[in-house]
Every structure is written in structure tokens, then in C-alpha cells.
Amino acid sequence: VKTLSRRYDSMNLFQQQLKEGKTGEELVYNWLTSRGYHVYDVSDDADWQAKDVDFLAFSTDDVLKIEVKKDNNANWSGNVICELISNMKTGKDGWWLTCKADRLIVVMAPTKYLVIDLPTMQHLIDTGELVWDSIRDLKFQESSHYYKDSRCGLIKISKLISAGIAEIYLI
């Protein structure tokens, strides 16, 4: 397990990540509505937060539960990062283990989205048919103390596309 450290001085890490996440959610909301979905934002609802679901997207014949992650690094690294343990000190499960969404939409850039069939990916990982390319401990440092330690799995985007469970959309 490798450890990666990042230092944040200018803004509280949580607030910075929340702001970035909301930007990604807004982009996906607009994209889904432009594709004809009726989208309901449930990201502030405690019940849906517990399931890590941001949107309910209704079409004429389907309802999709959507989770949005904004990851600018995915564009250049070619990897998707999935939080396995949210807090190493408490052992709190990361969103990978709690998310009940049908689709994970990773905003790689304002005009580039990766859409993943999340239940299928979770099943393939659980059964060993698909494996993490690496597991990493991430330490986020703010000033002189660590703000958050988490453990994440990284998997190549090309592997997800080859498995037929992900597509890239250029907007």
C-alpha cells in the first residue's frame, strides 16, 4: 500500500472538496436534463446521503440513482479512484462500500464524463473478476496536522471500458 500526501493551506479541505463536488454535480445535472431526464437533486437529503446518491434521474421507462464524483486527475492518470475507507483512524467505510447508486458519473473535465455501471463494477470487484490496480493510503494535510487519512482503490479506466461497464462521453 503506497501513501500519497497532499498539503492544503488556503482553505479547509472539506469545504474545498464540497465546492468542487457541487460544481461537478451542477455539470451532470445540466447534462442529464439536456438528455431528456427529469432530475431530482437528493444530495442534501440525509436518507440519500447515507446511500451516497446525489440524483434521481427519471426517463420515460427508467429511474436511475446517480452518484457524481469530480476527479480532474482521472483525465491525465487514466485511473478512477474509489474510497474504500473514509477515515483510517475510525475505520469508517468509504463511499465505495456504502454507495447504492446505479451509475457513478466521474466528471474528468467540464466536457468529459465517465459513466460507470456501479453495481456491476462492485460485483466484479467483490467476486475477483476485476481487481484494483493498486490500493493507496491518502493523507490530506492542512497546516501542520493531518486532516484526513483514507484508503482508496485505483483502477484503470481502460479496464472498465474493456469490461463493458463504462463509457466516456464528450460533451
Image: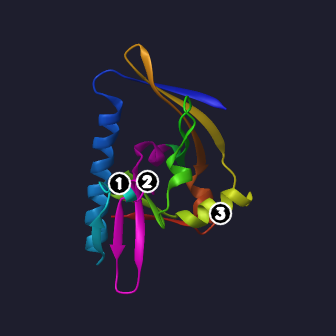
Task: Give the number of marks.
Answer: 3
Left/right placement of residue 32 relative to residue 99 reads left
Q: Nearer the viewer, mark 3 or mark 1?
A: 1
In percent of width and height, residue 120 lies at 60, 66
Q: Which residue is mark 3?
A: 123
Neighbourhood count class around disc 3 (C-alpha, 10 Å): few under 14, some 14–19, many 20 upward:
few
Residue type at tag 1: Ala
Numbered mark located on residue 157 in the image: none
Q: Which residue is mark 1?
A: 46
Is the N terminus in the top left, top right, bottom left or bottom right quadrant? top right
What secondary structure is found at the residue carrying circle 1?
Answer: helix
Q: Which residue is mark 2?
A: 50
Magenta range: 48-76
Q: Looking at the image, which residue is at 65% across and 63% down?
A: 123
- In the figure, 32 relative to 159: above or below? below
In percent of width and height, residue 130 lies at 69, 57
- In the figure, 84 relative to 171: above or below? above
Label 3 vs label 1: CA separation?
A: 26 Å
Q: Looking at the image, which residue is at 45% across and 57% down?
A: 51
In percent of width and height, residue 106 lies at 43, 55
Label 1 vs label 2: CA separation?
A: 6 Å
The residue most toward the bottom is 61
In percent of width and height, residue 14 lies at 34, 34
